[in-house]
Amino acid sequence: MRYEVIIAGASFAGLAVAAQLRGRRVLLLDRKPIGTGQTSACGTLVNTLQALGLEESILQVHDRLVIHSAGRTFVYPMDKPFCTFDYARLCHLLREQGDAEFVLAATLDLEGDRVRTSQGTFQGDLIVDASGWRAVLGRRLHPALVRRDRLNFGIETTAAYRDDGLHFWYDPRRLLPMGVTWAFPIGDLTRIGIASYRGETRLGNGLDRFLSSLGVQRDGVHGGYFPYALRDPVIGDLFLVGDAAGQCMGLTGEGIRPALFFGTQLGRLLRQVLEGEITLEEGREAYRRLVAARRSGYALLCLAQRVLPRLPLPLILGVMALVRWPPVLRRVLTLYVGAFWLETTRR
Ligand SMILES: Cc1cc2nc3c(=O)[nH]c(=O)nc-3n(C[C@H](O)[C@H](O)[C@H](O)COP(=O)(O)OP(=O)(O)OC[C@H]3O[C@@H](n4cnc5c(N)ncnc54)[C@H](O)[C@@H]3O)c2cc1C
């Protein structure tokens, strides 16, 4: 029952940490079987999946982002393409890269080096909270960690609809005053959703109105909260990663790439700690620095999410048009994409 590393949460962030710890005694905990808890549209950068050896999960590649607003359409070509992928496939591919023991259990509490779960108590030298926005372990140590006013909320469905590119609609008058809708194609089907920047959870009617404007119907719904503000990545001896550390980005709601990026980097640091190359304190500091280096980008997106929807629509349309200008688009994409650029990390 004693492990070198215990990871609570076996989705993007938790699996990425575990993948870097092959050969060590690692326990992965999740309340759901691996690959069954999809909450998102699963859109991410192709490079990220290629760097991690996960390209087999790709369903469709998209080389343009399209924003629709007030009857106008803005097309942004992307020289670094995005893709939509199969969640279960990706989780299983990532899982196979590590050799952690998996226990299907709800994580309940943390006391020192002991993690209490629905299947008993486990001891760990290093403990990682990768349990998503709820941060089940982090909030035990820091009850104010999860702030409801720092959470977005979204739902989506899958519908028979074909398209190219990642599409967003910003239509405050017709659909949602403080939020967006999207359509992310995956071959013959498309993941179509709606999210509120105010964390509103009653989005079913808005989703149905949006679906009917596209002439399609919903087939099941999934979704949930996702944070838009960074939290402390280390609390006491606990490491937090992915949504548990608030690493999902504001405005765009992109959280998979940061979860995979920070999860991979954290896994590498923990390996260095276990192999005696660095001390635990150095590992903590290095992880803090890694996050802090991106703090200003997070703060900017957080501010943009709060301010942009409050601006007059003509001004927002002006910003969208400006970003279409190639030098501006190149600069924006370089900063946005470069923040979580992964070189091949396969061990
Ligand atoms: C509708 C919607 C659409 C989205 N679309 C995109 C998108 O297209 N692209 C993108 O980049 N981001 C998207 N996001 C955001 C993205 O889903 C998250 O940022 C991402 O999932 C974070 O990964 P994670 O591993 O940190 O957490 P999660 O994916 O939330 O995983 C947390 C894991 O912890 C487990 N867990 C939770 N509580 C416990 C417990 N008590 N005990 C044990 N296990 C537990 C869960 O079962 C889960 O497996 C979307 C979010 C929503 C809601």
Image: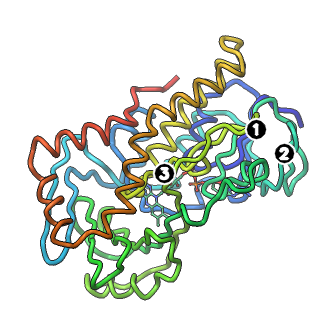
Residue 68 position within the rendered picture, expressed as x and y whole percent measured from the top left: 20, 70
Alpha carbon separation for disc pair 3 and 2: 25 Å
Tell me the residue at 48%/37% (across/down). 261
Q: In this view of the protein, which residue sits in the foreground, 301 or 210?
A: 301
> Which amino acid does the dot numbered 3 rest on?
Cys
Q: Earlier in the sequence, mark 3 or mark 2?
A: 2
Number of marks in the rendered image: 3
Kind of residue at badge 1:
Ile
Please name the residue that numbered disc 1 is placed on: 6
Query: Which of the pair 179/113 is nearer the observer?
Result: 179
Q: Name the secondary structure under disc 3.
A: loop
Residue located at (49% from left, 79% from top)? 220
**Element at badge 1?**
strand
Residue 101: percent from left, percent from top = 75, 39
Of badges 3 and 2, the one in the foreground is 3
Q: Which mark is in front, 3 or 1?
A: 3
Q: Residue furthest top?
A: 277
Q: Earlier in the sequence, mark 1 or mark 2?
A: 1
Q: Amino acid at mark 2?
A: Val
Please determine whether, in this image, residue 218 is positioned above or below residue 106: below
Q: Label 3 belongs to which residue? A: 248
Quadrant position of residue 267: top right
Is the CB–ligand 1 distance for label 3 below 8 Å? Answer: yes
Q: CA distance from mark 1 to mark 2?
A: 8 Å
- Disc 2 element: strand
Residue 191: x and y in percent read 37, 68
For the residues bearing labels 3 and 1, Cβ distance under 8 angstroms? no
